[in-house]
Image (tube, grey):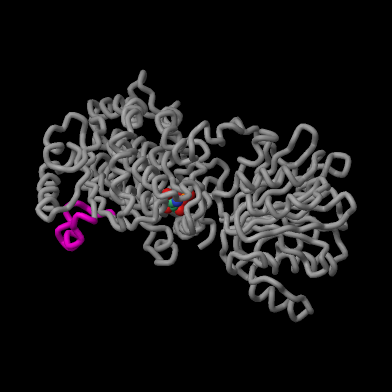
């Protein structure tokens, strides 16, 4: 939920740290701070309530020499978002500074023990307890900072990605992780870059080390020891360097006003990337490696249990309709935050599908453990390679949507749905539920997805006009049937999370059982009324809304001539195989939410109270 960066190299650390934080603000931005060991050996810490720009305003006024430092952008978990609780946190003796992402679950008892030893605390945070604990162990064992960190990990439960500096060891940064994301870039000149993900690292190097849980790394320039890695037991480990082929500019905005806008418009290319090597038009087949290597597990599954959060959960809901209709496989969809505590009945023949853009969502990670303990097969659908969920799953498929910076998920969602439709098609074909003709028709339609999305993106005028009418709204209804019901939920979530307008997604057929009481001109309805599914019934529902003076915008199939005579606005999407229609109908709803948020002057990429990756419970 927070972002950490660290640097030790041949340049001044300060500008590298500040620019690194800018890449991580999507992870949280209610406070920020930086800590540097100056050339005079002094440890300097600056921290503010507010975002990185606010930190820069404050810290820029001070001199910042020194080639080693750490920095942090926070999404508050323990303690209010204020300067005292901002990171870096200092040890009581003032020698050690630490930044932390994650949650130290036993911080209360640690705090009590340290207080009994005379340690005082300024903040409400678990992170300050950790830095005091490290300081205590460094003193008790008269050891190096790296050793003190390693020893401390034995006494810590919970999750962390940390970067630590000590003014008694200038030119060195120590870093470690457990269950939280961490990447370490290694420059050709020996400089080292620590970050919660690779965005801050890519402008400097493509050579990245992904530490394992409880790895501790001591980083310094080669002439001072270079990159030294050990496990929690102190055994030296050779770091594995991965070459990341994503270029730095790929994580920039490409001329769009916001990351979200860019990522919505990247979706045609994302479909191509996601299908590459998997949808083999020339061979009339789909090849999903995770399925091919685990055919029996998938084909003999007693049921598919999908576990996810938020938008990823909506992708799971779309897939449920397909697993049952096209692969004749029972499918349940669970909120991870419920599944992990509910003590669910999990069968060893279950296939548990964990869908997550970040691969770091705490609730989704926690839901994997009971599934694995019960002997179920865990399959991850993730957008971030080497993420925790990818590492924990028995098999996984990467959505290949590229880095998604906007907090509101868009391209990752459509890629998730596409991967899941590929899996359904593989299973349905292998089980003889999906005939050869339908299978080939589906493949042909999959290959059409990029151009169909291009068509939707080519003219946003109707969406912009509709968005302008929604600015004063305080509530909306989104309605859809069948596999469009999850898209109604997703459309409602999008507009909620970035424009702060309350919106509810509902099955269209359910509207008459209560929500219809909300209908009035001031509460507009968005109805997904494409030709697939129960189109006629949806027309009846639209008439029910109109009879109560409700304003309606319909998402309709291109060529539909009925709806335009009935409703206030119609936004058209091309016709495609019903399994794939949700991928098309969601795009106008993404654009609608975007334009409403821009029209309201909201912070589209960093909506209030939200974070891109909810790595805490
Ligand atoms: C999506 O727009 C939201 N920001 C949020 O619901 C998100 O989908 C959810 O937190 C799950 O994240 P994940 O896919 O990274 O697990």
Q: Is residue 508 rendered magenta in the image?
A: yes
Name the residue: 60% across, 63% down: 103
- Can the viewer see residue 411? yes
Above or below, 87 relative to 313: below
Give the farthest residue toward the bottom: 116
In-image side of 461 versus 146 (left or right): left
In the rendered structure, the answer to whether residue 94 lies left or right of residue 414 reads right
Q: Is residue 446 in view from this perspective? A: no
Of 262 and 289, the residue lying toward us: 262
Query: At which x and y percent is residue 588?
Result: 32, 39
Residue 141 position (above or below residue 354): below
Relative height, residue 254 to residue 375 (above, below): above
**Rendering coords of residue 92 (x, y %):** 79, 70
Task: Say which of 562 and 271 sits in front.
Answer: 562
Q: Which residue is drawn at 25% across and 54% down?
A: 477
Residue lying at 46% horizontally and 60% vertically, measured from the top left? 370
Instruction: Tell me residue 454's x, y (percent).
Output: 35, 28
**Residue 100 colored in magenta in the image:** no
Region rendered in magenta: 505-522
**Quarter of image, res 127:** bottom right
Looking at the image, which residue sits at the far top? 282
Q: Where is residue 461 in the image (x, y as percent from the top left)?
A: 31, 34
Quarter of the image for residue 413 reads top left
Residue at image position (67%, 54%) is 55
The N terminus: image quadrant? bottom right
Q: What is the tally of numbered marks visible in this picture? A: 0
């Amino acid at each position: 939920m927070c972002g950490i960066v660290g640097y030790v190299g041949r340049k001044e650390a300060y500008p590298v740290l500040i620019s690194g934080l800018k890449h991580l603000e999507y992870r949280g931005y209610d406070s920020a701070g930086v800590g540097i060991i100056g050339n005079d050996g002094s440890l300097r810490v600056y921290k503010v309530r507010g975002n990185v720009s606010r930190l820069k305003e404050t810290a820029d006024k001070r001199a910042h020499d020194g080639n080693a430092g750490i920095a942090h952008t926070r999404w508050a978990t323990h303690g209010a978002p204020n300067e005292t609780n901002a990171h870096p946190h200092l040890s009581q003796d003032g020698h050690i500074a630490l930044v932390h992402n994650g949650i130290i679950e036993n911080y209360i008892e640690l705090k009590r023990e340290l207080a009994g030893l005379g340690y005082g605390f300024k903040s409400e945070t678990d992170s300050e307890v950790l830095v005091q604990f490290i300081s205590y162990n460094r003193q008790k064992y008269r050891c190096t900072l790296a050793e003190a960190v390693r020893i401390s990990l034995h006494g810590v439960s919970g999750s962390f990605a940390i970067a630590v500096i000590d003014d008694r060891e200038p030119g060195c940064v120590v870093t470690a992780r457990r269950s939280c994301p961490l990447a370490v870039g290694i420059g050709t000149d020996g400089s080292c870059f620590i970050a919660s993900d690779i965005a801050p690292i890519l402008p400097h190097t493509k050579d990245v080390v992904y530490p394992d849980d409880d790895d501790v790394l001591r980083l310094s320039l080669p002439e001072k020891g270079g990159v030294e890695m050990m496990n929690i037991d102190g055994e030296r480990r050779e770091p594995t360097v991965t070459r990341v082929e994503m270029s730095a500019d790929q994580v920039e905005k490409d001329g769009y006003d916001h990351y979200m806008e860019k990522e919505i418009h990247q979706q045609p290319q994302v479909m191509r990337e996601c299908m590459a090597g998997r949808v083999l038009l020339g061979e009339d087949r789909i090849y999903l490696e995770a399925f091919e290597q685990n055919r029996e597990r998938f084909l003999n599954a007693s049921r598919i249990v999908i576990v996810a959060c938020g938008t990823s959960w909506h992708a799971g809901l779309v897939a449920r309709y397909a697993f049952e209709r096209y692969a004749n496989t029972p499918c349940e969809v669970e909120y991870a935050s419920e599944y992990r505590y509910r003590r669910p009945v999990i069968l060893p023949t279950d296939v548990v599908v964990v869908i997550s853009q970040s691969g770091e969502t705490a609730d989704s990670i926690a839901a994997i453990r009971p599934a694995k303990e019960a002997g179920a097969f865990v399959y991850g659908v993730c957008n971030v390679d080497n993420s925790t969920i990818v590492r924990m799953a028995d098999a996984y498929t990467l959505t290949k949507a590229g880095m998604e910076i906007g907090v509101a998920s868009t391209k990752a969602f459509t890629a998730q749905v596409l991967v899941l439709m590929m899996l359904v098609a593989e299973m349905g074909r292998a089980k003889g539920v999906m005939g050869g003709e339908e299978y080939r028709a589906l493949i042909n339609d999959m290959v059409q997805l990029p151009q169909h999305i291009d068509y939707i993106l080519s003219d946003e005028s109707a969406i912009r006009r509709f968005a302008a009418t929604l600015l004063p709204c305080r509530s909306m209804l989104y309605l859809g049937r069948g596999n469009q019901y999850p898209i109604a939920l997703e459309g409602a979530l999008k507009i909620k999370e970035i424009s702060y307008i309350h919106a509810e997604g509902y099955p269209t057929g359910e509207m008459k059982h209560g929500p219809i009481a909300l209908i009035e001109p001031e509460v507009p309805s968005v109805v997904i009324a494409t030709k697939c599914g129960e189109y006629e019934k949806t027309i009846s529902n639209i008439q029910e809304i109109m009879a109560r003076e409700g304003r309606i915008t319909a998402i309709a199939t291109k060529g539909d001539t009925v709806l335009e005579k009935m409703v206030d606005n119609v936004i058209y999407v091309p016709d495609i195989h019903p399994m794939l229609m949700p991928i098309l109908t969601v795009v106008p709803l993404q654009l609608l939410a975007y334009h409403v948020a821009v029209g309201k002057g909201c912070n589209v990429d960093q909506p209030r109270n939200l974070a891109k990756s909810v790595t805490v419970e």
